[in-house]
Amino acid sequence: MAISASGLISGLDVNNIIEELMHLERQPILRKEARIEQTEAIKELWREVNSALDTYQRTLTPLLDEKTYTAPVPKSSNEDVLTASIGGIPDEGTYRFDVTRLASYHSVAMDPPTAGQRIADPEAELGYNGTFFLGTGRQPEGVDFLQFTAETNQWLCGSFGAGFQAYISGEEEDVYYLEIDQLEFTEEMELGGAETIKVYMDSFTGDEGDDLTDELEDYYAEKGWDVDLEEPLFEIRKEGEDWMAVNQNGDPFAIAGDQPLGIFGLRGEIDDGDGDVLAVESFDFAIREEGDIDETALITLKEEDSLLTVAQRINQVSEETGVEADLVRVGDDDYRLTLESTVEGKEGFIQAYDFVPLGGESEEEYGTDRVLELLHLVSPDSGAAGPDYLLETQEALDAEFLYNGLKITRSSNTFNDVVSGVEVVLNGTGPATLEIAPEIDAAVEDISLFVEAYNEAHAFIRRLQDEDDGPLQGSGDLMRIERQLRTVIHGQVPDIPGSSHLKDSLTYSGTADVSAVASGEYTGTSNQIILEYRDRDGVRTWRHDGKDFQSGEEIHGVTIDIDQRTDPAHGDTLTLEVSPPSKPIKYHSLSAIGIMADDEEGVLRVDDAKLRQSLMEDADSVYRLFAREAPADPAGRGRGPDGVVRQMQNLVKTMIGPGGLVQNRERSLDRELQQYADRIEMIERRLETREQRLVRQFTFMEQYIARIQEQTGLMASFEAMHQQPGDN
């Protein structure tokens, strides 16, 4: 709030006089504000120092990882055929591939036989009311299929549906038959003359895993069925060209609606007719209650739905089913629905079946039209063994390739179980060589980044100290930082000899008065030298590693003098803590691997050829030059310097970490700024008081002058009143 005096009486510009006086009084504040501005600028420079060191510190982390120097990297001779990446711990070597076939995604399409059955408008109502199941050999997980795959004898390789999502309604007359009439085999597969697959029940459990075998036996007994669960529960027999599932009485195998609900654990066996089992495979078949049906893979259409609706419904659950749909305009007035598996190889074979529910309410909910047949995706003869597609646009094929001369198949073009620790991706056919070997490019790049960041930080610090115009010239803290950084960069990382034991680390198991002193440089590999006292036939001696030992003798470079005032007891042990020497390093300085100062300013330069040669000759020594942790003596004291990067990391932490030099400098500047602010605030309060006093003083002066003027006027009036006529 401005304070003013009028100056009307005196005729003086009082406010200006006060303002000028206060301006003179404010000079100390102006000087301190200039110091604040200067200190803020210095603090900002220290923030930049912190940022430069932090950036430098980030380049250190990769160099502490041994994999940076020695990690094997896969290289493909032909990336058009295959590429690879590390997915574990690989074995170095060269691996030959010859890819003859890539795994493919199964795809099928509508194939209308006549022009009159083509769909001209994909959004027109189809008029279908039905449901179909959709999935692949792998998805969805909740759908049950019986599948035989002989791994040892490749005769049988096929699958057939087990009622798919059929359920038990609880009505006894509802009977489910296993449709086996279209069990198929690949061309090269044969049954070796056998025409029967025997299916045994290994278990029958509920959803909670409880054993329901006794309950199933009681059920069969109540029905009067002579069922022996030790015998095949049913057999799959070949009759002519067809396969049928029959029970132990030779009748079609059926599951009645009122039987116990659970999961059959089944085992299929093929024999050669003489009783010798040729192939065995286990599988499950679940019987569920109505309502437990997993409708994820069921696509239901109503009469008002269109071909576009079909595609949309399929794509809504494609993640669960593994099948995607698309609409293709083949020509005028001809839209086709296509289905493509998202799962590679034979496992991605699209399983599509018209779902025919039991009667009653189920028909109302699911419809009765065989939608897949009406859409001309499958033939009317398509059965549970596998859909018979009218138009298969891409066969479901596994990848085939020779690997070091061995023929191998995989369901996917991406696999990690052929070359240990390596994920391989097949991109095309043809020969390719995969070489797994250490890659030095990554190490060279990380080391170069480390050198570049050091040069930037070092140059920035030197600019701040420039004797002509450096804003922080003469800073002892900055000079200390520069000196310490250069000391580490140009320092040595020597081999560290082994240590002798420390007296306070010696332990003795007995009660006798025994002590020992050791001298020399230990050359062994253990952290302890253990001596055992022996008494054999009156001869008392210490033993080490099965050999007699006398005081003053040497063990692995260490001479041990035992002070033994009394004899220990037989079996007493004397243990000396020692530290083995460090593993020898081939390169003891950065200059030894091609990193050296390029000029008087201390700028580092990387000799790329020398660095690469060092990495190729002894990558482990380069790693230990950078990242070695110096061993400690038995008392926990370090016995030599860490590697260069580890030293640098510890040093930078002491500079920019909590309580570090840079942080302390910033805190000191903050305190200085606060002191200036406090002093300014105090002066401002004093000046406010001073200004108020000046206003009061000038106001009093104005009042005093006014009284004088008033009295002068009165006196003049008085003289005029008493002056005689003619008086001058």
Image (tube, rainbow, N blue to C red):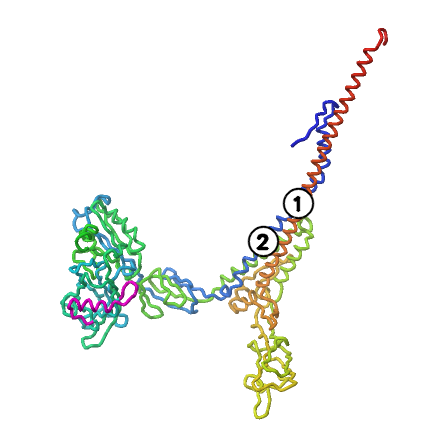
Residue 531 relative to residue 476: left or right: left
696 to 301, vertically: above or below: above
Residue located at (24% from left, 69% from top):
213
- Decide if residue 243 is in sight here: no
Task: Tell me if residue 212 is in the magenta stretch.
Answer: yes
Task: Tell me if residue 536 is in the magenta stretch.
Answer: no
Residue range (magenta): 205-228
Give the residue pinned by disc 2: 52
Mark 2 vs 1: CB contact within 8 A: no
Residue 331 relative to residue 660: left or right: left
Looking at the rendered structure, the number of numbered marks drawn on it comes to 2
In the rendered structure, which amino acid carries the disc numbered 2?
A: Ala
On the image, the x and y values in percent for residue 486 come to 63, 60
Residue 639 relative to residue 300: left or right: right
- Decide if residue 632 is in sight here: yes
Name the outermost residue toward the right.
Answer: 727
On the image, the x and y values in percent for residue 706 come to 75, 22
Distance (Cα) linking label 2 and label 1: 21 Å
In the rendered structure, which amino acid carries the disc numbered 1?
A: Gln
Residue located at (15% from left, 60% from top):
173
On the image, the x and y values in percent for residue 315 come to 29, 51
